[in-house]
């Protein structure tokens, strides 16, 4: 499926930083969890639910401060955060986190909230690009997880009730059905955040062009 392999090629320094950071975190996750996909999902979904909430809060405050419409960004980002939280609630039923994983969750969430808050204040474009790349990696991970289940290497257990209710799945749904809908969610978040980064990049270019035009006008006036 073409939509699963979509990748945003870095076009500027900001994109390269976002991709490099994502690949570094991917390396850490692969090293620590290897093929423990259920436990991996529990820890990573805890972190994945942070960006939408942080970004939504900051845009909400900006909208209030500037008395400007947010063009639907706040709801989209908060819905994303809630969706990622439901991924976590689902995988907790499938793979109970160990004590070490719970400690990692606490540390990772605390560090990432502060980190993402700073990044978003410094560069919204980079922040959304990071999430876009995060979600690209999530799609890859869930595709690998699904393959392991379909090949019988991981038991295709019954889907948790919370997942059946949230995604309106058939009552006889299995783990592989849950992985598919979650993977589709991640692909959607990937596209949304890359789109947000592109919009912000376009605005930055327009601002730069406007400044250059203003500079030329001022120079002409001086002449």
Image (cartoon, rainbow, N blue to C red):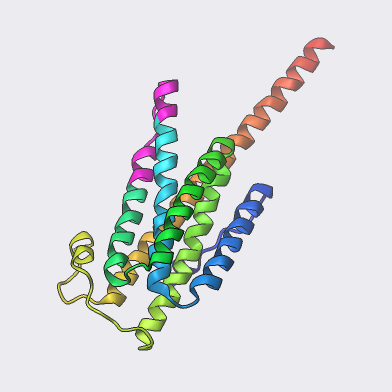
* Residue extending farthest top: 222
Q: Is residue 7 left or right of residue 185?
A: right
Quick one: 15 or 101, which is closer to the camera?
A: 101
Quick one: 35 or 127, which is closer to the camera?
A: 35
Residue at (28, 75) in percent of width and height: 175
Q: Is residue 187 visible?
A: no
Task: Tell me the quarter of the picture where residue 220 sits.
Answer: top right
Quick one: 22 or 93, which is closer to the camera?
A: 93
Tell me where residue 189 appears, x and y as whole percent.
42, 55
Q: Report the predominant secondary structure element of the magenta stretch.
A: helix
Quick one: 4 or 186, which is closer to the camera?
A: 186
What range is drawn magenta here?
61-78
User: As displayed, is residue 79 above or below residue 165?
Assistant: above
Tell me where residue 186 appears, x and y as whole percent.
40, 60
* Residue extending farthest front: 99
Residue at (36, 50) in percent of width and height: 80
Q: Is residue 85 visible?
A: yes
Task: Tell me the quarter of the picture where residue 59 sits.
Answer: top left
Which image quarter holds the C terminus? top right
Tell me where residue 194 appears, x and y as whole percent.
51, 51
Q: Is residue 169 left or right of residue 114?
A: left
Residue at (43, 76) in percent of width and height: 36
Which image quarter holds the N terminus? bottom left
Look at the image and say whether residue 65 sits in the magenta stretch.
yes
**Circle count:** 0
User: As displayed, is residue 1 above or below residue 150?
Assistant: above
Residue at (36, 60) in percent of width and height: 185
Tell me where residue 144 appears, x and y as whole percent.
45, 77
User: As displayed, is residue 179 above or below residue 155?
Assistant: above
User: As displayed, is residue 21 above or below residue 155?
Assistant: above
Q: Is residue 12 left or right of residue 90?
A: right
């Amino acid at each position: 499926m073409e939509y699963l392999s979509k990748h945003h090629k870095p076009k500027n320094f900001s994109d390269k930083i976002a991709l490099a950071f994502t690949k570094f975190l991917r390396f850490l996750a692969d090293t620590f969890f290897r093929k423990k996909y259920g436990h991996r999902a529990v820890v990573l979904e805890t972190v994945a639910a942070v960006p939408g909430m942080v970004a939504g809060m900051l845009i909400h405050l900006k909208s209030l401060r500037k008395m400007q419409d947010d063009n639907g960004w706040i709801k989209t980002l908060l819905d994303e955060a809630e969706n990622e939280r439901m991924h976590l609630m689902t995988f907790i039923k499938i793979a109970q986190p160990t004590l070490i994983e719970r400690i990692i969750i606490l540390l990772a969430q605390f560090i990432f909230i502060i980190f993402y808050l700073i990044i978003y204040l410094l560069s919204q474009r980079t922040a959304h690009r990071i999430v876009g790349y995060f979600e690209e990696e999530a799609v890859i991970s869930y595709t690998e997880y699904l393959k392991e289940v379909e090949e019988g290497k991981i038991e295709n257990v019954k889907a948790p009730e919370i997942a059946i209710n949230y995604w309106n799945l058939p009552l006889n749904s299995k783990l592989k059905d849950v992985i598919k809908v979650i993977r589709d969610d991640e692909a959607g978040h990937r596209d949304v955040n890359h789109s947000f980064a592109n919009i912000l990049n376009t605005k930055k270019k327009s601002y730069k062009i406007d400044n250059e035009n203003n500079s030329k006008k001022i120079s002409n006036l001086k002449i």
